[in-house]
Amino acid sequence: MARSRTPKFDATEVITNEIIRIIERGVLPWRKPWTAGGSSRPLRVGGEPYQGVNNFLLTMRTVMAGHSSPFWMTLPQANALDAKVRKGEKSSVVVYYGQSRKGADGEDDGSDGDDRSEEARIFRFQKSYRVFNACQIEGLPDSFYPDPEPAPEHPPSEPIPHMQAFFDAIDITTVFTGTEAYYLPPVDKVYMPSITRFHDPRNFYGVWAHELAHATKAPHRLNRDFGLSKFGNTSYAREEIVAELTSVFLGQTLGFTAHTLEMNAAYLHNWLRVLRSDKGAIFKHAADAQRACDYLIARSQAGRAGAAPRPPEPRENGDSHVTQGTENAAGGLLQRRPPQDHHLQTRCLLVEPVRGRVSALGGT
């Protein structure tokens, strides 16, 4: 008699299906402004922030469950602190990656330095484990429930100094003009509307982060390529997921949330098509987004540390200005000037209809 087998737990499939169900309801919970106990990122029991896909997953779950603590831990970790998970609480699945070395004969290959090491192959593996939020646990020290910090208030349509300084220091040229936001690969420039078009300035920085994320795919930066990108195709959708998650991760550091000028059924369909066809997509693209976020942070730090700035480009008149990514750039003052040059306005209008071709070239 054949013995029945319980299907093997597939964390990749379970997590992807969880995200699909949420998006099918027409919401992106990670776009909701939140902090838990003064932290905008989920934290491990020791206080280290989660990275990549685990950051994304636990951010989403914190928002949806309304947890007020940023701390997450495994059941053994809670038990080690003489605390107990409350009865009926459900765990959250997260993942970790490791690697093992196998010799040509299939045996584990130690680091003994013999000749077999040249034939050894390294295998990456993914395993899952379960964690609980501190709000699901009783008996933890008070330090796991930090007091919330008041949300800062920002004047409408005005630059936020620390965010503006961060973005100005990045050595990717941004041109502020028109009403659309996109990255144009042939000229390697980001185009953005003026901050005056955004009532909430945090949305301005969320959009800017999204477009700078696209710029990181350039061959001389991170060289990210999903194939020929046309508006609405799978390659386009994959790059959109990377840009969205990069904006999420960067916003956690600076204090804004992911934002795009358009949020419609087509945008959600892009996510669903990719996730339904590739259960590993969210894991791969969260890693891509973490690399893009780390890259932008490093470039901003270099710019603010006084790395040799590029010579400034000639500034365009009117409602458009160029920032070269250094703190010496025009920044927020020029972007608040009203249009001065009607010839430039015509030129801007000629740029905007290229929107469809921008997408075909990989911009957004």
Image: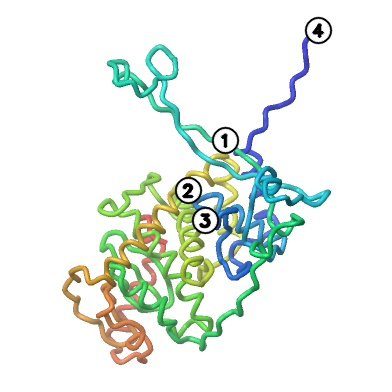
At mark 2, the secondary structure is helix
Per the model, the C-alpha gap separating discs 3 and 4 is 51 Å
Give the vertical position of 189 relative to 18 (above or below): below
Query: Mark 1 to mark 2: distance in Å?
Result: 18 Å
Q: Earlier in the sequence, mark 2 or mark 3?
A: 3
The image shows residue 13 at horizontal and vertical percentages of 63, 38
Q: Is residue 126 visible?
A: yes
Q: CA distance from mark 4 to mark 2?
A: 44 Å
Quarter holding the C terminus is bottom left
Mark 2 closeness class: few <14, some 14–19, many ≥20 residues within 10 Å? many
Kindly report which numbered mark, 1 or 2, lies closer to the viewer in this rendering.
1
Q: Residue 285: which disc? A: 2
Marks 1, 4: nearer the viewer: 1
Q: Is residue 34 visible?
A: no
The residue wearing badge 4 is: 1
In the picture provided, is 131 more to the left or to the right than 156?
A: right
